[in-house]
Image (cartoon, rainbow, N blue to C red):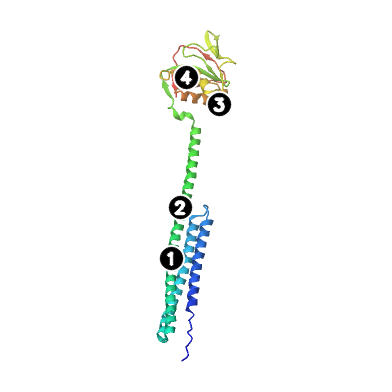
Amino acid sequence: MSRRKLVIPDCLEMLLDTICNTFGAVIFISMLLSMFVGEKTAGNSARNVTQEVEEIIALQQHDIAVARLRQASLKSQMEQQEAILSTLSHPESQRLASEIDQLSRLSASMLDQKTKQVETLTETEAESLSMEAEILTRRQERQQLQKETAALRSEFEDAIRKAGRTARVSRVRSTDKFGFAYMLHDRRLYQVITPSGSINDDHCREIDRDGLTCVLPKPDGGIVLPAEKSVLGRVFDGIQPDRQFVRLFVSPNSFAEFTTIKDSLIDMGLEYEVIVFEDNKAELFMSSEKIDSFVQ
């Protein structure tokens, strides 16, 4: 009896095609994920990242579903193959058919494992992309908070600058302390009375006017402003803050220099009273009469 030639069904070609497509899908998905992670910039919004994650997950789920359909088709073909094996009577044909069946089952098992690996990879990449989207959102929120904090700090510094140094001292109040007279005139600071109680001849000169002693600033005397803090400190040296204060007479032509003098007095912890000369007429009349003073 002639030996019949065993014809191998086309299921192996379909199996090979399924396995190749599955590996191709895995490589394609990995390339997509790599391109997505590599090209993403910090300027992307969290909403766009989430949409792209969802699109990639949907694409992967579609490929998994296609692979499972092919796996089901392969299983059906294997069942048909088993039915064909039962009809074969020749030992050699049964042996070849058995080897083909084992190979088909091994390939189906490998396909199932690869499908599960793709599912695991999909879940892992989805979690990774979601975490990156969350990190991006938090980074953008932090940058926004840093901008708002910097703006508030700038506004606060401007407010302090505009408010001036007077915010560091109390409001104007009366005092019983003894005041030492100084004149701020023609952008110069003059010490009228020294801590020893005498008139500073280097800064001022005395004249008699209708029987009264009048003190005038010397044109070339005093301290030219602006001056170093150490120089200003020597001018106010000797004044005791707990018992004495600075009585400062200011001409309108030296208002701009008043801020510097005020800051120096505050730094030294000295109270001061401000009196404005009229029409830049800098002259003081000496008197023993007690004068009510209001310092700050």
Counting other residues with Cα less than 10 Å from the Cα at mark 2, is it few (<14), some (14-19), or many (20 or more)? Answer: few
Q: Closer to the observer: label 2 or label 4?
A: 2
Identity, as a three-letter code, of the amino acid under mark 3: Ala
Q: Secondary structure at mark 1?
A: helix
Q: CA distance from mark 4 to mark 3?
A: 19 Å
Taking the view exactly as shown, the residue that stands out farthest to the bottom is: 1
Mark in the foreground, 1 or 4: 1
Percent from the top left, x then y, of residue 88?
Answer: 42, 86
User: Along the line of sight, which residue is nearer the eye, 28 or 274?
Assistant: 28
- Report the residue marked by disc 2: 135
- Of the residues tagged 3 and 1, which is closer to the observer? 1
**Upstream in sequence: badge 1 or badge 4:** 1
Query: Residue at 48% of width from left, 23% of height from top?
Result: 265
Estimate the x, y position of residue 37 in percent, counting from the top left: 51, 57
Separation (CA) of disc 1 from disc 4? 86 Å
- Mark toward the viewer: 2 or 1: 1
Crowd tier of the residue under label 3, counting other residues whose Cα lies within 10 Å: few below 14, some 14–19, many 20 or above: few
**Helix, strand or loop status at disc 4:** strand
Q: Disc count in the image?
A: 4
Q: CA distance from mark 2 to mark 3?
A: 53 Å
What residue did someone put label 3 on? Answer: 256
Q: Position of residue 254 (x, y in %)?
A: 56, 23
Residue wearing tag 1:
117
Q: Earlier in the sequence, mark 4 or mark 3?
A: 4
**Looking at numbered disc 4 in the image, what kind of residue is underneath it?**
Val
Q: Secondary structure at mark 3?
A: helix
Callout 2 amino acid: Ile
- Which residue is under mark 4? 246
